[in-house]
Amino acid sequence: MLSVRSLYAGYGDIDVLWDVSFDIGEGEFFTVIGANGCGKTTLLRAASAMLPYSGSIKLCGNEVSSLSRRQLGRLTSMLTQLSDAHFPFTVYDTVALGRYAHRSGLLSSLSSEDRKITEEMLRRMDLYDIRDRLITELSGGQLRRVFLARTLAQEPKLVMLDEPTNHLDLKYQLSLLDYLQEWISDTGSSVLGVLHDLNIVRTYSHRVMIMSEGRNILCGETSEALRSKELSEAYGVDIRAFMVDALEKWK
């Protein structure tokens, strides 16, 4: 699904990513973890062709820098950490924007298939009852679910999520991640996610890449990665000891 080789990327003349390589297979939930500032968001921006890069990033066999925005929109979608509402669109219209790459033009009307998928995403994200409300009137958690619904309405082969559970309470976090698992299983599509909650990572991820200072220091099965010495090195704290101690407090 995604093949990254010897990736260097950054801002201006300063590289943030250094010689990063990894693969994501079809139907895989792949998570990138690491301390703040290690390059996780920069990796997503490069993979979605939002940043120039050197090396290779191939999505479904195509170098992403060679694809048009419409071609990219049919293969991948990305949810960023930012969830600000700048325009007073309705919830329905915002989610329907996710169908743009599948339409014949900006002003073309929604097809019956577009409407079907838009309404399905509204129901999946528990937004159908507020579909006519303006997004400028929503809470942070509601707005986050709107943008998640728009992202998934694109029907991408690969969805990239930067802290997708931000602003969501536990119920909606679990609902979203359960749906992503179901979506992966049904479609064979894949997820590239950046997550901070390692309990969620352990529960939902198939494989994990640990990053530190812009480099990939370990890539492997989730249970293996979360037991590795590289995890504590990346965060500068004994994660496993903290988790075990926290669990004891729930007994």
Image (spheres, rainbow, N blue to C red):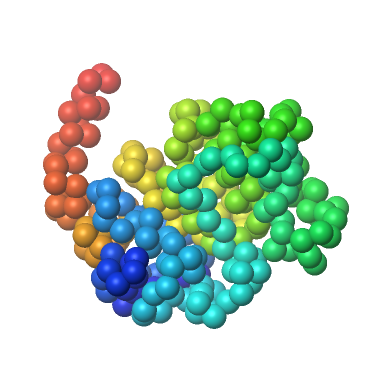
Residue 71 image offset from top left, x and y in percent = 63, 72
Is residue 91 visible to the viewer in this orientation of the structure? no
Provide residue 165's location: percent of width, then percent of height.
46, 39
Query: Residue 181, image x and y in percent?
Result: 52, 48
Q: Quadrant of the C terminus?
A: top left
In the image, residue 133 sits, relative to residue 55, either above or below, namely above
Q: Quadrant of residue 211?
A: bottom left
> Residue drawn at (41%, 57%), measured in percent from left and top?
30
Q: Quadrant of residue 52?
A: bottom left
Q: Residue at x 48, y 65 (%)?
A: 50
Total numbered circles: 0
The one of 115 and 97 positioned closer to us in this rendering: 97
Q: Position of residue 44 (x, y in %)?
A: 42, 60
Q: Residue at x 43, y 68 (%)?
A: 51
Taking the image as shown, residue 134 lies to the left or right of residue 141, namely: right
16 is higher (above) or lower (below) than 228: below
Viewer can see residue 139: yes
Out of 174 and 58, give the one closest to the viewer.
58
